[in-house]
Image (cartoon, rainbow, N blue to C red):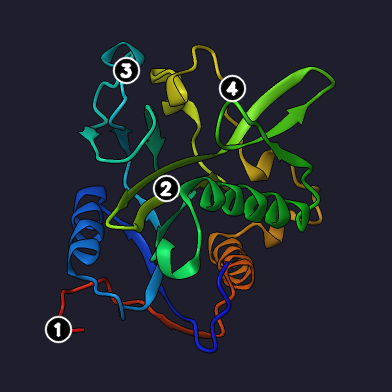
């Protein structure tokens, strides 16, 4: 990354939101931003929704039923968002940070591994399947966090989804990330009884944004609960 005397970040704590308004706000933010716009990280939980990336194939939607399916402009296949899952949107000027897309994916994976280690969870990325995984038993592997990005004019949006304490059943209605039979898991299933009280959405989100801030070199951070409302900001 390029050194910077002043690198500012705004963090939006958006709580629980419907998916489409946040998607449209991300797209608008990316269209509106200029070379001097501060980077932003948005933390959010979504109402139940399946999102299908640009490479998404209909065959991976097994039985969506009453959960809506939204086709989106990120990379990757199909995934599920729902309450109890922390979604982190990274609206970053990659050129200003001196990062390529692969660099950002590595930062995301390493930040998640660091976060999970703080809860006593041993996790790892995979070179052939972006995301973060854990071992359950000697042989059984499950995915705990998914990644999906889009870059426009050198700026990233979309981001990652970390399963914290949620209903995992909707993942059985799809082939998660396009992999047949891929098992999904969540933090609450892997933490010790002592750590469960700390496995709360707000705390997990705060820890993760602090890790991102440190890894990306931000030295001025502001926080708000207000959604993005346009260029007047």
Check contact, mark 3 vs mark 2: CB within 8 A: no
Quadrant placement of the N terminus:
bottom right
Which of marks 2 and 4 precedes in the sequence? 2
The mark lying in front, picked from 2 and 1, is: 1
Q: Residue at x 27, y 71 (%)?
A: 227
Kind of element beneath mark 2: loop
* x then y, percent, for residue 119: 76, 55
Mark 3 → mark 1, Cα distance in angstroms: 40 Å
Residue behind mark 2: 83
Residue behind mark 1: 232
Which of marks 1 and 4 precedes in the sequence? 4
* x then y, percent, for residue 137: 82, 23
Using a 10 Å C-alpha cutoff, classify the residue at mark 3 as few (fewer than 14 neighbours), some (14 to 19) or many (20 or more): many
Report the number of discs.
4
**Relative vertical location of residue 224 with respect to residue 142 in this rendering, above or below:** below
Which of marks 1 and 2 precedes in the sequence? 2
**Looking at the image, can residue 126 be seen?**
yes
Residue behind mark 3: 61
Residue behind mark 4: 183
């Amino acid at each position: 990354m390029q050194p910077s005397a002043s690198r500012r970040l705004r963090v939006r704590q958006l709580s629980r939101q419907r998916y489409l308004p946040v998607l449209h706000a991300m797209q608008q933010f990316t269209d509106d931003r200029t070379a001097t716009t501060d980077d932003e990280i948005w933390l959010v939980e979504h109402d139940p929704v399946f999102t299908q990336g640009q490479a998404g194939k209909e065959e991976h939607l097994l039985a969506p039923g009453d959960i809506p399916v939204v086709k989106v402009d990120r990379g990757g296949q199909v995934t599920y968002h729902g309450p109890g899952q922390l979604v982190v949107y990274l609206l970053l000027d990659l050129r200003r940070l001196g990062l390529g897309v692969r660099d950002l994916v590595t930062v995301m994976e390493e930040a998640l591994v660091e976060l999970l280690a703080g809860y006593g969870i041993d996790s790892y990325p995979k070179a052939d399947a972006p995301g973060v995984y854990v071992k359950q038993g000697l042989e059984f592997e499950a995915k705990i966090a998914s990644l999906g990005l889009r870059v426009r004019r050198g700026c990233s949006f979309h981001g990652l989804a970390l399963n914290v304490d949620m209903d995992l059943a909707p993942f059985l209605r799809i082939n998660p990330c396009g992999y047949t039979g891929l098992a999904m898991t969540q933090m609450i299933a892997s933490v010790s009884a002592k750590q469960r009280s700390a496995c709360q959405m707000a705390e997990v989100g705060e820890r993760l944004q602090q890790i991102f801030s440190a890894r990306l070199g931000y030295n001025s951070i502001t926080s708000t609960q207000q959604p993005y409302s346009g260029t007047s900001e």
